[in-house]
Amino acid sequence: MTSMAKGDEAQFDAAKNITTIAGNRIVFHCHHYNVFLQRTIDEALGEGAATVQRLAATEASRKLLGDLFGGEPAGEARERFERAAKLFGSLGFGLADIGGLTGFGGSVVLRTSHYAIGWRAKFGPASAAVCHFAVGYWAAAVAAAAGIAPERVIAVERGCAAVSPDGDAESCSIDIEVL
């Protein structure tokens, strides 16, 4: 197996044509696929759609990040957050500023967001925040880094660049609380 990029966590097996991270198979999709799927779920489930998508993202990301962090000796939460941020960016989900994040919660600012940018490009301004995957991912990162159950982590998107009617919002913000 060969690494996709120097320092990247993903491994590509050319013989099997699969990419894995910490033994978990992953699939890459473009914004066209991701935001169309998200909008389809939104329309099908209505009001509860964002919660379902956030929880699904938390569970999938918790498994991935838990396996990724699991082989390490107990390390600093900061190091794990930095690793999670690097992976988040390497997978194309955006540039995450984790300066306000600790093992007790805090905030993550997405300087760029795959979902917010993709939504605006495909559908125009959104009526509500759209970064459900990112919210779930960062809830999972806190849970995995701190070694706690994901149910103890509450994450909410407080600002979303996709919602700005003029397209002038430069970032998305996620607030995270550990119960």
Image: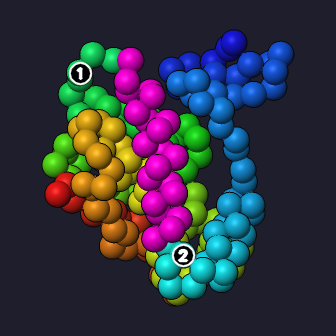
Q: Please tell me which residue is depicted at 33% across the width and 18% down the height of the picture.
A: 72
x and y, in percent, of residue 29 in the image:
72, 50
Q: Magenta span: helix, strand or loop, mainly?
A: helix
Q: What span is colored magenta in the figure?
A: 51-71
> Which three-letter amino acid code belongs to the residue tagged 1?
Ala
Q: Which residue has dot 2 on it?
A: 49
How packed mark 1 is, by other alpha carbons closer than 10 Å (few <14, some 14-19, many 20 or more), is few
> Which three-letter amino acid code belongs to the residue tagged 2?
Ala
Side (left or right) of 87 relative to 149 = right
State the SS at label 1.
Answer: loop
Side (left or right) of 117 relative to 66 = right
Q: Which residue has dot 1 on it?
A: 74
Q: Please tell me which residue is depicted at 53% across the width and 65% down the height of the picture.
A: 53
Side (left or right) of 34 relative to 53 = right
Q: Please tell me which residue is depicted at 45% across the width and 60% down the height of the picture.
A: 55
Residue placed farthest to the top in the image?
A: 1
**Vertical side of 103 occupied by 176: above or below:** below
How packed mark 2 is, by other alpha carbons closer than 10 Å (few <14, some 14-19, many 20 or more), is some
Image coloring type: rainbow
Quadrant housing the N terminus:
top right
As drawn, the label of residue 144 is: none
Decide which of 45, 130 is in the foreground and name it. 45
**Vertical side of 113 occupied by 82: above or below:** above
Pick whichever of labels 1 and 2 is earlier in the sequence.
2
Quarter of the rendering containing residue 36:
bottom right
State the SS at label 2.
Answer: helix
Q: Are marks 1 and 2 in contact (CB under 8 Å)?
A: no
Quadrant housing the C terminus:
bottom left
**Vertical side of 168 occupied by 13: above or below:** above
